[in-house]
Amino acid sequence: MDSTAIVPSGTKALAIATLIIDIILIQPTFLILWKHGKRGILGWFYLQALCAVRIIANALQVHDIAKHQPGGTAVLILSSVGLSPLILAATGILHEARRIRNPELNDKLQWAIVFQFHMFVSAALGLVIYGVVKLTGGHVTSTSSALMKVGGAGLVVCYVFLLGWAFVSWRLRRQSQTPAYEMGTTLLYGVLAVMPFIAIRLGYGVATLILELEHPTSSFLTSLAVKVVLGLVPEVIVQTILIAAGLLTLNANKIFSQTKGQL
C-alpha cells in the first residue's frame, strides 16, 4: 500500500473525534463489566475490546498522518479486527440475557455453543487478517485473496446465525415475569436493537476488503462521508445502545441470584 498517498481532507479530524468518543464510551463499560459479573463477562469484555481496538487504531492513524504515512498495515488490521468484537459483544450479552430469562437452560450446553461460535468467528477473522497482511505487503495471490473473501463470508454467516439466535430467544417467553426476567429482556432488546447497525458495519467492512483487493483506487475507500455514515455511526450506535442496556441492568446478577429459586 502506498505510504505517500494523499490523505483525504478531514481524515485526521475524524480519527481524533473517534478517539475522543471511544475514550468516553470505554469508561462505563468498566462499571458494567464489574457489576454484571461472570455471567456477563463475555459480552462486556468484548464491548471493552471494541472500544480499545478503535482507540488504538485511531491513535495509530493520527500518528501515521502526522508522519505523512497514512494507511499503515497496523491500522487496516485493527480496523478489520474491529468487526469481531461487534459480533462477539452482542453474542456474549445475548448469552447473559438467555441465562437470566431462562435459568432452566443447560448452562454447560449454552457455554459450549458460545465457545464454538467464538472459535468460528476467530477462524474467520484469522483469514481476514492473513489477507490484510498479504494485501498491505503487496504479495496478494489468488489463494490469499480467496482466503480473505472466505473470512469475510464467514463473518457474515456468524452474523446470520446470531440474528437467528436472538430472534429465537425473543420468541421463548415465560408466563411469570420476575424482575430478573425483565432485566434479561432489556438486555435481549438491546441485542435485537443493534443487529441492523451491526449488519451495516459488517457490510461496509466486507465491501472495503473486497474493494481493497479488486478496486484499490475506488473513491468508496477514501470517501469521508462513507467512513462516517457506514463505519463510525453504526459502531457508535451499537456501543451506545449496549452500554445503555448494561447500565439499566446493573443489578441483574444480584437480582437473578436472589430470585433464581422462584423461577
Image (cartoon, rainbow, N blue to C red):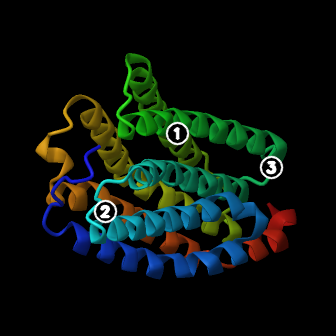
- The residue at the point 57 percent across, 63 percent down is 49
Q: Are marks 3 and 1 in contact (CB under 8 Å)?
A: no
Mark 1 lies on residue: 125
Q: Looking at the image, which residue sits at the far right?
A: 261
Q: Is residue 105 left or right of residue 236?
A: right
Vertical order, 31 against 54 (above or below)? below
Of the 4 image quadrants, the one containing the N terminus is: top left
Q: Is residue 215 left or right of residue 18?
A: left
Of the pair 94 and 128, the residue shown nearer to us: 128
Mark 2, other Cα within 10 Å: few <14 / some 14–19 / many ≥20: some
- Quarter holding residue 247: bottom right
Compare marks 3 and 2 and give the one earlier in the sequence: 3
Mark 3, other Cα within 10 Å: few <14 / some 14–19 / many ≥20: few
Q: Position of residue 41 (x, y in %)?
A: 70, 63
Say which element carries label 2. Answer: helix
Q: Position of residue 252 (x, y in %)?
A: 69, 72
- The residue at the point 59 percent across, 50 percent down is 91
Q: CA distance from mark 1 to mark 2?
A: 20 Å
Q: Which mark is residue 232?
A: 2
Say which element carries label 1. Answer: helix
Q: Amino acid at mark 2?
A: Leu
Q: Amino acid at mark 1?
A: Leu
Mark 3 lies on residue: 104
Of the pair 34 and 102, the residue shown nearer to us: 34
Q: CA distance from mark 3 to mark 1?
A: 33 Å
Q: Are marks 3 and 2 in contact (CB under 8 Å)?
A: no
Compare marks 1 and 2 and give the one earlier in the sequence: 1
Q: Amino acid at mark 3?
A: Glu
Vertical order, 189 against 115 (above or below)? below
Mark 1, other Cα within 10 Å: few <14 / some 14–19 / many ≥20: many
